[in-house]
Image: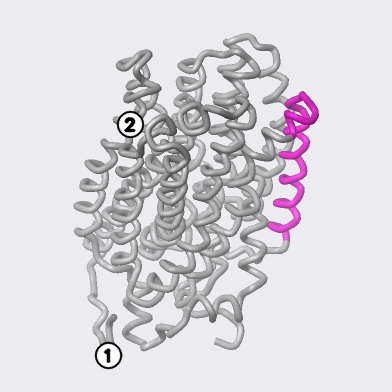
């Protein structure tokens, strides 16, 4: 950690722009790799894990058991936020992000080696659970650092929402790569996909991690963190301090995310179970449709971040939340026709309202926390949602359908989440266009 009196390097406009570009690329590539790892697990859970690791269970029960392991990754994310948020505010954004990438990549690579129930019985599921937890810890520390690495290099307040949206771009990019890998090796391996084909994409993650490390090692620490170290404003226990000083922002950030987080996993993970088991749709149709939806997000996420700089962070976010609440009913109406073309359209459209929220979300949450506590506060607020929304979402969707035999019950669940997000976002302070370089928490 830097000591008091450390000089902050003075960069020319060209050098600053070059560093900003590198930071945005490093953040986006890094989050793409980490989300590839995380979503690959999500995709394979719905297609493979219930059959290979819980073969003696009823199909619905086996699906629930597989999604329970899947949910463990979400429970672990606030743990990662607490651990890496602490170090991100203590030793810097860059060093912390290198650690999260290595942790995530190592856990994902090991998933490829886990024996099935036929080989070692229930121990296969136990090992998967441990690796999924490690994955979740890595992702829990990744998001906050990636957003800050980009946002804190932004010199102009007028473009902060757009710049901070690029690490968010890593989500659809990772989703695209994960589903592309599953689709490609499904086609290559054919019937062998259930035995060995699904393992190859997990093996490949180790090469992606190498690329990500190479890029991240070549960037500088953010000006905000360098200023904090030079002014000797580094907190000894930033996670404890942010809980004491900004608890409202942590809680509201977590609740504001529920309409973005839970529906996303209904649209991208639960759909593989609902589509294949209930609708009788082909695995490849669903994979291609989710690929298409992720490509649409390539546009909607940065566009929504850009629009949030024009019309305000909260306004853009609340428009997205309202759209998510309404769209759930259209989504299941189209799916339940069982017509392949309409199933494809429903899935293609599903991530548009999500992108309307996800684009401005990074800046909206990160701006809510003062600089010296920003990594800890933003990470914790963001990742707490995984426990109440993202992780349970496929389980709740499966249970609702089992009880009511209707997708509209799930649409009602999505609407309720949208109402929670609207109310919570309304209570957050809007920092669009405001200076966030100086400390602004009360009593600082």
Q: Position of residue 72 (x, y in %)?
A: 53, 50
Give the image location of residue 254, x and y in percent.
Answer: 62, 59
- In the displayed structure, 121 sits above or below 11; it is above
Name the residue carrying label 1: 5
Q: Disc 2 designates what residue? A: 199
The quarter of the displayed image where residue 392 is located:
top right
Q: Please, is residue 405 above or below residue 285 in the view?
A: below
In this view, the residue in front, 166 or 279, is 279
- What residue appears at the point 45 percent right and 31 percent down from the top-left corner? 44
The magenta span reads: 400-426
- Which quarter of the image is occupied by the N terminus? bottom left
Dot 1 or dot 2, earlier in sequence: 1
Badge 2 marks a residue whose secondary structure is: helix
Name which residue lies at 42% across and 60% down: 141
Q: Nearer the viewer, mark 1 or mark 2?
A: 2
Secondary structure beneath label 1: loop
């Amino acid at each position: 950690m830097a000591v008091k009196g450390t000089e902050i390097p003075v960069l020319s406009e060209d050098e600053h722009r070059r560093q900003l570009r590198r930071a945005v690329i490093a953040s986006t590539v890094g989050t793409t790799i980490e989300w590839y790892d995380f979503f690959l697990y999500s995709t394979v859970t719905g297609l493979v894990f219930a059959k290979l690791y819980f073969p003696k269970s009823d199909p619905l029960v086996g699906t629930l058991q597989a999604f329970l392991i899947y949910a463990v990754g979400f429970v672990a994310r606030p743990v990662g936020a607490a651990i890496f948020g602490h170090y991100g505010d203590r030793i810097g954004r860059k060093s912390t992000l290198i650690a999260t990438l290595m942790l995530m990549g190592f856990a994902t690579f090991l998933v490829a080696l886990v024996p099935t129930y036929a080989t070692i019985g229930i121990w296969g599921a136990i090992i998967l659970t441990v690796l999924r937890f490690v994955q979740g810890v890595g992702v829990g520390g990744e998001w906050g650092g990636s957003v800050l690495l980009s946002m804190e290099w932004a010199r102009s307040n007028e473009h902060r929402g757009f710049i901070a949206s690029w690490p968010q771009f890593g989500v659809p990019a990772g989703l695209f790569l994960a589903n592309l890998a599953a689709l490609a090796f499904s086609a290559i391996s054919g019937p062998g996909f259930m035995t060995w084909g699904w393992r190859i994409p997990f093996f490949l993650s180790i090469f992606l991690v190498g690329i990500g490390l190479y890029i991240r090692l070549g960037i500088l620490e953010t000006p905000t963190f360098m200023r904090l170290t030079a002014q000797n404003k580094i907190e000894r226990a930033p996670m404890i301090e942010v809980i004491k000083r900004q608890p409202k922002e942590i809680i509201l950030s977590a609740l504001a995310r529920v309409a973005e987080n839970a529906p996303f996993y209904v649209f991208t993970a639960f759909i593989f179970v609902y589509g294949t088991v209930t609708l009788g749709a082909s695995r490849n149709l669903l994979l291609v449709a989710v690929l298409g939806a992720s490509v649409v997000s390539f546009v909607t996420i940065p566009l929504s971040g850009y629009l949030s700089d024009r019309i305000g962070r909260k306004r853009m976010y609340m428009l997205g939340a309202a759209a998510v609440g309404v769209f759930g009913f259209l989504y299941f109406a189209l799916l339940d026709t069982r017509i392949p073309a309409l199933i494809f359209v429903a899935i293609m459209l599903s991530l548009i309202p999500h992108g309307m929220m996800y684009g401005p979300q990074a800046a909206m949450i990160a701006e809510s926390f003062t600089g010296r506590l920003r990594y800890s506060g933003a990470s914790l607020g963001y990742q707490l949602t995984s426990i109440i929304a993202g992780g349970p979402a496929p389980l709740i969707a499966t249970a609702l359908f089992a009880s009511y035999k209707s997708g509209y019950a799930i649409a009602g669940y999505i609407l309720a989440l949208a109402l929670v997000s609207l109310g919570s976002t309304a209570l957050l302070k809007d920092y669009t266009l405001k200076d966030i370089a100086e400390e602004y928490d009360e009593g600082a």
